[in-house]
Amino acid sequence: MIPLVDLNRQYKTIKKQVKSAVQNVIDQTDFILGKEVSAFEEEFAKFCQVKYAVGVDSGTGALELAMHALGIKAGDEIIVPVFTFYATASSVASLGAKPVFVDVEDDTGNMDPAKLEQAITSKTRALIPVHLFGQPVNMPEILKIAKQHNLPIIEDACQAHGAEIEITPGEWKRAGSMGLMGCFSFYPGKNLGAYGDGGMVVTNDDSLAQKLKLLRDYGRTGKYQHDLLGFNRRLDTIQAAILRVKLKKLGIWNESRRKNGNLYSKLLSKIGIQTFKTRTFVKEVRHVYAIRAKNRDGLSQFLKENGIATGVHYPIPLHLQKAFEYLNYKEGDFPVAEKIAKEILSLPIFPELKNSEIKKIVDCIAKFNSKI
Ligand SMILES: Cc1ncc(COP(=O)(O)O)c(C=O)c1O
């Protein structure tokens, strides 16, 4: 079986270092906001080319705390793409604010800047663009619109550790470093994944970084002194120690994902399969490799019968999720996302995937197509 994601293949290559990193934390009984957390924060900030990184419990926690840090409250509107993982929008709702959806581009699945402006109202307080599947969203356009309307940007970079975009000619920026804050998830299957939950908020803003550190740790300035309504949303020290080991390899792993993606694209174009486009002004990190298929469910079943696992990211656009029924959107409101959701299929793309496996997967897709 070729799995969609194979964490075990990767673990085998770093087993020794991971075990010793975990053992060190236990030996030092340095469990809560330990030295490994601050060391990882420093290294991750450098990796993202920003001044500060604040470790938190998850990508969802990162988004929620970023909005708390901005003082987002009930009744505020926050703009998010309609085609993304649920947590981009649920984090908005959890603060009592209203997610306002924007449709996406048909050829990338990323938020369409051309449709962004019409979603802005007098109640809009922030924009949360998502770098979907590891490809940076069109930030030059989104930054322009945000500036015109004086709105802060919180980047949802949960799927884009290390992705880059040419923001002005010759000037490349990393995902998460262009908005006021950038949010990352270290869910195990991410490009940089922990062995449990984890997340990070990155920023260049001194006062926001200080506020985020209070917000994740009960708002406290002393052991029992709470100056701010904060929470328990800390990054676990054992996870930070593991993430430090893995961050050293991230560049190599992202490069492998890119190579795998390029091979897929070359082979799939020969058999006429539609894939998402990579923009010329980005370096994506291939968190997900998605194709489009009219008979998506039939193809997925056929691949499964031939020992190939696939996924669907995402079968239901957010405005049609039951959880967001109260927002009163209806079918037809976001036609591009609705179409993509019916056709999209994710193929295995993890760094350790072999060329022979990619060829087998593409051959199998060709076989299915020749039957219909
Ligand atoms: C785009 C996006 N946003 C937010 C999240 C939430 O991250 P987490 O699962 O770490 O809470 C994820 C990943 O799961 C994601 O892919």
Image (spheres, helix red, strand yellow):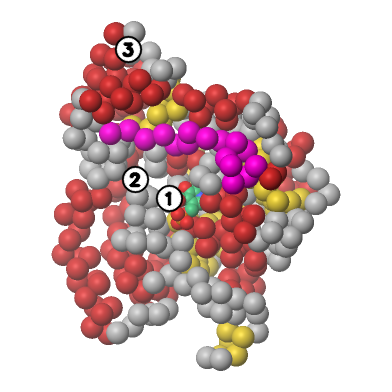
Q: Position of residue 262 (x, y in %)?
A: 34, 29
Point out the frontmost of discs 2 and 3. Answer: 3
> Where does the N terminus fall, quadrant-wise?
top left
- Label 1: how many Cα within 10 Å (few below 14, some 14–19, many 20+): many
The tag earlier along the polypeptide, 1 or 3, is 1
Pointer 2 with pointer 1, Cβ within 8 A: yes
| x 69%, y 59%: residue | 96
- Label 2: how many Cα within 10 Å (few below 14, some 14–19, many 20+): many
- At label 1, the amino acid type is Gly
> Where does the C terminus fall, quadrant-wise?
top left
- At label 2, the amino acid type is Asn
Q: Quadrant of residue 339?
A: top right
- The disc at residue 254 is 2
| x 64%, y 73%: residue | 207
* Vertical order, 32 against 339 (above or below): below
- Along the line of sight, which residue is nearer the eye, 128 or 230? 230
Please tell me whether mark 1 sits on a helix, a strand or a loop. loop
